[in-house]
Amino acid sequence: MKSKMMITGLVLFTAAVVFAAPPATERELPPQDAEVLRFVGRALAWHPTSKFTILSDDKHMTPSGSFRLIQVERTGASPGLNSRSTLVIDEPGKAIWFGSVGSLPSKEVGKTVEELKAFVDVFIPDILMKNMRMKAKVDWNVTKEGPSALVPFELVVDTGYGDFRRPGAVTVGGAFVLLGAPMPFDQDPVAYRREMFETSKEIMWDHEAGGATVSIVEFSDFECPACRTKWPRIKSQIEKYPKAVLHGMVNFPLPSIHPWAFRAASAAWCVSEMSPKLLPQFKETFYSLQNDMELSLVTPTSVDFVIGQDLEEEQFRECYLKKISLDAVHAQMAFGNFLGISSTPTYFVNGWMVQAPDALSLDQLVKALVAGEEP
């Protein structure tokens, strides 16, 4: 069980498996860019004891402008959060990319943009299939506005039920490849995400907003053990502040390691469309059966739940594993990848990312936000 939980947390953080982030060299620390450190502290998962240090900050020139390759170390947080992160700042594009960063084999990439794209078209899908059993292809037809030192693409990933998209890019010249998403460097990342949640159609809210001032948006997988064990901590905050806290869920199944998670996500979306307030109860039903659940049992378990809650079985069957719910779950997965989700569960509390929350720090965060304060 422990190993499965670790895989769940790392499976989308491809750097840990495929694209090893460039290590910090043994040298004096570079100047500690206050703007970068503030951005990182508000963009990465929040914890009250976190301290960030820039280990390396290397500037690279390309024909299209410069980019900075920066490695940041987090210390002082909970053991699961202490780590090193690599990010790329696209200076002409005024964007900062978080995610998996790795070097490309320069001798094989080629010299032209066409040769670079042709190499990536083969290289990345081959690596993902060999290391993660992930079937994907590269789509270069991505809107690009203004100058940039990066060439963006999207990975079109096959879940077995259809496709979803996750963003990525290569630096001009082909030195590095990124699997991640850009954020505007001139905007506050917390406010940026909060605004996205206010307009997103991918969130399954389980009750009306009313006068709620704090939103908790959960990205989770029904087959994820950590999602099950962390849910009571989130639920306690919802119950503690019933009028102030609004809860919503976004399906983020990991089909490459969780064989029945996608089907459960489809069922959850259908239940949410029929009766949003039943979504937490539906989730808890699957969590309670998680150790014994199998692919063949998802459908009868879901139907039993629908009938037991006096919902229309026919309406559910017209939705479940049909195009409408499959498209919705794929859109939710794409939304999570655009937000830089690297593990499940991941929560956003008024735009602040939270991963593996301990009860004390989560209570501190929500209490401050309910009071209208910064954490």
Image: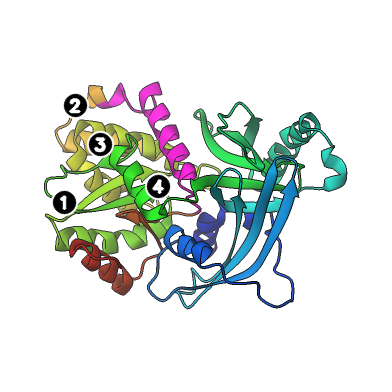
Direction from residue 68 to residue 187 in the image, left or right = left
Residue at image mark 1:
212
Q: Which residue is at 65% across, 72% downward?
A: 30
Q: Secondary structure at mark 1?
A: loop
Alpha carbon distance from label 2 to label 1: 30 Å
Residue 289 visible, this orientation: no
**Of the residues tagged 2 and 1, which is closer to the observer?**
1
**Of the residues tagged 4 and 1, which is closer to the observer?**
1
**Vertical arrangement, residue 151 with respect to residue 186, above or below:** above
- In magenta segment, residue 222: no
Q: Amino acid at mark 1?
A: Ala
The first of marks 3 and 1 along the sequence is: 1
Residue at image mark 2:
312
Alpha carbon distance from label 3 to label 1: 20 Å
Q: Quadrant of the C terminus?
A: bottom left
Residue 130 visible, this orientation: yes
What is the tally of numbered marks visible in this picture?
Answer: 4
Direction from residue 82 to residue 115 in the image, left or right = right
Q: Secondary structure at mark 4?
A: loop
Residue at image mark 3:
272
Residue at image mark 4:
293
Q: Residue furthest right?
A: 107
Alpha carbon distance from label 4 to label 2: 24 Å
Alpha carbon distance from label 4 to label 3: 21 Å
**Of the residues tagged 4 and 2, which is closer to the observer?**
2
The first of marks 4 and 1 along the sequence is: 1
Alpha carbon distance from label 4 to label 1: 35 Å
The first of marks 4 and 2 along the sequence is: 4
Q: Which residue is at 83% across, 47% downward?
A: 106
User: Which stretch appears magenta?
Assistant: 316-342
